Image (cartoon, grey):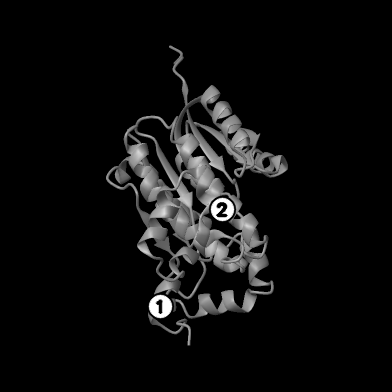
Amino acid sequence: MKNNSKKNVIVVIGPGQIGQAIARRIGTGKHILLADMRRENATAAAEVMANTGYEVSVATVDVSSRKAVLALVKTATRLGNVTGLIHAAGVSPSQALPATILKVDLYGTALVLEEFGRVIAPDGAGVVIASQSGHRLHALPAEQNKALATTPVEALLSLPFLQPAQVTDSLNAYQLAKRGNSLRVMAESLRWGKRGARLNTISPGIIITPLARDELTGPRGAGYRRMIELSPAGRAGTPDEVATVAALLMGPDGGFITGSDFLMDGGVTASYWYGELAPK
């Protein structure tokens, strides 16, 4: 007898190598909606996944636009019950100026979590891909931590310590955004919990993707290669390793984990604070 119940939907915002790897791990038997600012990126990822048996569709989204995020939510809920959110979109320090990084990586993430938090299904789960960079930022005052976690989305970019005169460097903007992601997830997990859903952050280190390969051969390449060489693991990570952690966090075995941040960087951060990578 045919099952006429609504499909379970996994939304992947930023279907790069990490987003795709997670979707492959948790997307069997579900409808996967791949969303990217550039539709051609989502289409290319969808073709790969569809050719290996997944049910996939695509959408365009600019995470820094509430109108665009609301349109994506509408598309997703039209497809079925949103049981999973993988938010892996963002821009890196070498790609954008500080203001753009804060708009996309900080504001955009908060916006996505707010709007999908209104529709996430009971027993659903979300994972935000942050970065080891958030763990290398100096300790912030408690009031700034709280502001990043709980300030209403539309007021986030107006916070005094995020103004252009205060944040002049793209790497600093990126670190603030990624620290903000983990704090925001902690606060948002409380609201998601009221719907019976969970939310966590993964903060990867250097994961080999096309973008990482560009970084390793770009202006900051020597620094990245040094991080790898002086880390306990002595190597970069892979998207599938990130997907293994995400599958735990989004599956039944992770049912007691919410509001948490998982640093997986091969020990780079440990070496930065207490080892050979420590600033002189």
Q: Horizontal and vertical percent for residue 115? A: 49, 35
Who's the residue at 61% across and 60% down the image?
A: 92
- The disc at residue 105 is 2
Whether 238 is drawn above or below 110: the answer is below
The residue furthest bottom is: 280
SS at circle 1 = helix
- Front one among 148 and 275: 148
Residue nearest the viewer, comparing 18 with 196: 196
Left/right of residue 27 with respect to residue 98 in the rendered view? left
- Residue bearing the label numbered 1: 273
Q: Residues within 10 Å of mark 1 (few under 14, many from 20)?
A: few
For the point 40% across and 30% down, which residue is it? 121
N-term mark: 2 or 1: 2
The answer to whether any part of residue 212 appears in the image is yes
Residues tagged 2 and 1 counted as in contact (Cβ below 8 A): no
Image-quadrant location for residue 256:
top left
- Which residue occupies the foreground of this view, 189 or 209? 189
Q: What amino acid is labelled 2 in the image?
A: Asp
Q: Residue furthest right?
A: 40
